[in-house]
Image: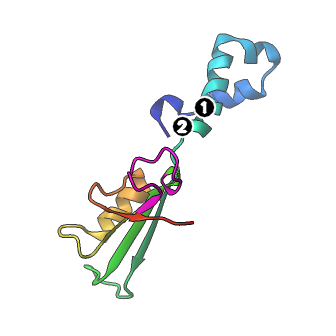
Amino acid sequence: MPDHLETREDDWKILDGDEILRKSNEGKKAIRRLFKTHGERKYKVGHMFFSKERIHPLSEWHFVFFEINETDNRNNHWVLGAHVHIVNYLWPNLNCQEIWSDFVQGRVFPKIKLHVSYCK
């Protein structure tokens, strides 16, 4: 979620408030902020696949990830259209636990990645 669209507790009070409150300047800002989040929100998806051993470093792992809009051919940043990304144990200096923690805690994807064409 972009910082400027982060909802506030008061936004929900304004939405539930009377018409005068909703039509005030602060009310209009809150309503715009609440409804703009749907258009600017980034839905990030990540899947980690790993071998069965329980000690690190894992012998094999794969992390497949994408933003929802990347699976559509329209307005795509990759010239070949719809795609997903992948990194795995074959990349040097990548650790699956760090990658997973970055994704879960900060919604951050690895900077190094391979683009793989996506077909529905």
Depth order, front residue of 103/42 = 42
Say if 57 sits above or below 43 in the image.
below
Kindly report the distance in space between the C-alpha atoms of the residues bearing marks 2 and 1: 6 Å
Tell me what residue is drawn at x 22 percent, y 70 percent.
91
> Is 20 situated left or right of 29 in this image?
right
User: Hey, what amino acid is under mark 1?
Assistant: Lys
Depth order, front residue of 76/105 = 76
Quadrant position of residue 120 = bottom right
> Is 72 situated left or right of 50 in this image?
right
* Rendered location of residue 68, percent (x, y): 53, 54
Tell me what residue is drawn at x 52 percent, y 66 percent.
119
Secondary element at tag 2: helix
> Is 45 situated left or right of 35 in this image?
left
Quadrant position of residue 28 = top right
User: Hey, what amino acid is under mark 2?
Assistant: Glu
Say if 38 sits above or below 30 in the image.
below
Number of numbered discs visible in the structure rendering: 2
Tell me what residue is drawn at x 43 percent, y 62 percent.
84
Residue labelled with disc 1: 36
Label 1 crowd (10 A; few <14 / some 14-19 / many >=20): few
Region of the chain picked out in magenta, as a range: 70-84
Q: Is residue 73 highlighted in magenta?
A: yes
Quadrant position of residue 54 = bottom left
* Most distant residue in the right direction: 18
Q: Is residue 18 highlighted in magenta?
A: no
Characterize the magenta stretch by its predominant secondary structure.
loop
Determine whether label 2 and label 1 are within 8 Å by CB.
yes
Residue labelled with disc 2: 40
Q: Which mark is drawn over residue 94?
A: none
